[in-house]
């Protein structure tokens, strides 16, 4: 990985542990997934700052446990107020990192302001149906604990359809075979509400029987 060893060690020691406060859909495993995907997209570009890419991905959901509805703003502020990052970045770079974190959310109405925002926004999208089914369920369970499984499946369908359906709002700025495969598969499920809910119910029951949720 083309990232400063000192920066990486600082983030792994001081930032990663904070993700234990997040619900499963936005935990440290998700962050590592986004970091790896971000690096993959960065490798397709020239003149890219890998330290910035890594930092954006590492901080992008840090404020999720504070307020999911505006976590991108909170996460960006937490990063920007981290005095330790001034050892690694100029003020201009920190502003770009801040904006990229603010711009990562799929539901934003505008295009990310920099290539760095486009990288992490794209990397933050799911690229497997299983991850989509699991994350949408665990997110709903965390924030609506009184809801039944069937209510959670219904909520998951509505959200995923608005996000990944034919006219969904999720944006993708890099060509990626994994994502195209996922999009085809998830849209097949979303084309029939009953099919999606049945698939999610079966998968969640499987995870539950294995003690994974």
Image (cartoon, rainbow, N blue to C red):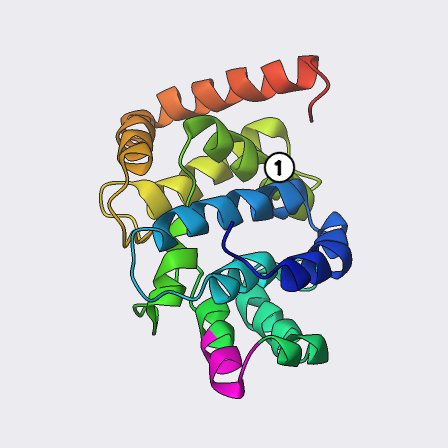
Residue ID at (23%, 41%):
166
Q: Look at the picture and state if 180 lies above or below 197.
A: below
Left-right relation of 169 to 116: left
What residue lies at 33% left-to-right and 42% top-to-bottom? 164
Query: What is the quadrant of residue 15 in the picture?
Result: bottom right
Where in the figure is residue 122, as x and y percent of width and height?
37, 52
Q: Residue at x 65, y 37 (%)?
A: 147
Nearest the camera: 179 or 97? 97
For label 1, the residue is 138
Toward the viewer: 174 or 199? Answer: 174
x 53%, y 42%: residue: 33
Asked if residue 144 can be seen in this view, the reply is: no
Which quadrant holds the C terminus? top right
Q: Main secondary structure of the magenta part?
A: helix
Q: Quadrant of residue 121?
A: bottom left
Locate residue 174, reporting x and y percent. 27, 50
Q: Is residue 6 visible?
A: yes
Q: Which residues are magenta?
A: 89-96
Q: Quadrant of residue 135 in the image?
A: top right
The answer to whether residue 91 is above or below residue 193 is below
């Amino acid at each position: 990985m083309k990232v400063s060893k000192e920066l990486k060690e600082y983030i792994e020691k001081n930032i990663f542990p904070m993700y234990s406060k997040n619900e499963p859909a936005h935990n440290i495993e998700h962050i590592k997934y986004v970091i790896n995907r971000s690096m993959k997209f960065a490798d397709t570009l020239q003149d890219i700052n890998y330290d910035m890419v890594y930092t954006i991905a590492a901080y992008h959901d840090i404020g999720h446990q504070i307020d999911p509805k505006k976590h991108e703003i909170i996460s960006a502020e937490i990063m920007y107020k981290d005095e330790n990052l001034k050892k690694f970045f100029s003020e201009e770079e920190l502003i770009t990192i801040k904006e990229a974190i603010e711009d990562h959310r799929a539901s934003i109405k505008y295009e990310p302001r920099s290539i760095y925002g486009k990288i992490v926004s794209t990397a933050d999208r799911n690229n497997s149906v299983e991850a989509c089914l699991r994350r949408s369920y665990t997110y709903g369970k965390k924030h609506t604990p009184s809801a039944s499984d069937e209510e959670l499946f219904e909520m998951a369908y509505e959200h995923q359809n608005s996000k990944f359906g034919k006219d969904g709002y999720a944006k993708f700025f890099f060509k990626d075979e994994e994502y195209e495969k996922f999009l085809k598969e998830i849209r097949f499920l979303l084309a029939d509400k009953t099919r999606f809910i049945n698939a999610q119910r079966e998968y969640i029951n499987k995870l539950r029987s294995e003690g994974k949720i």
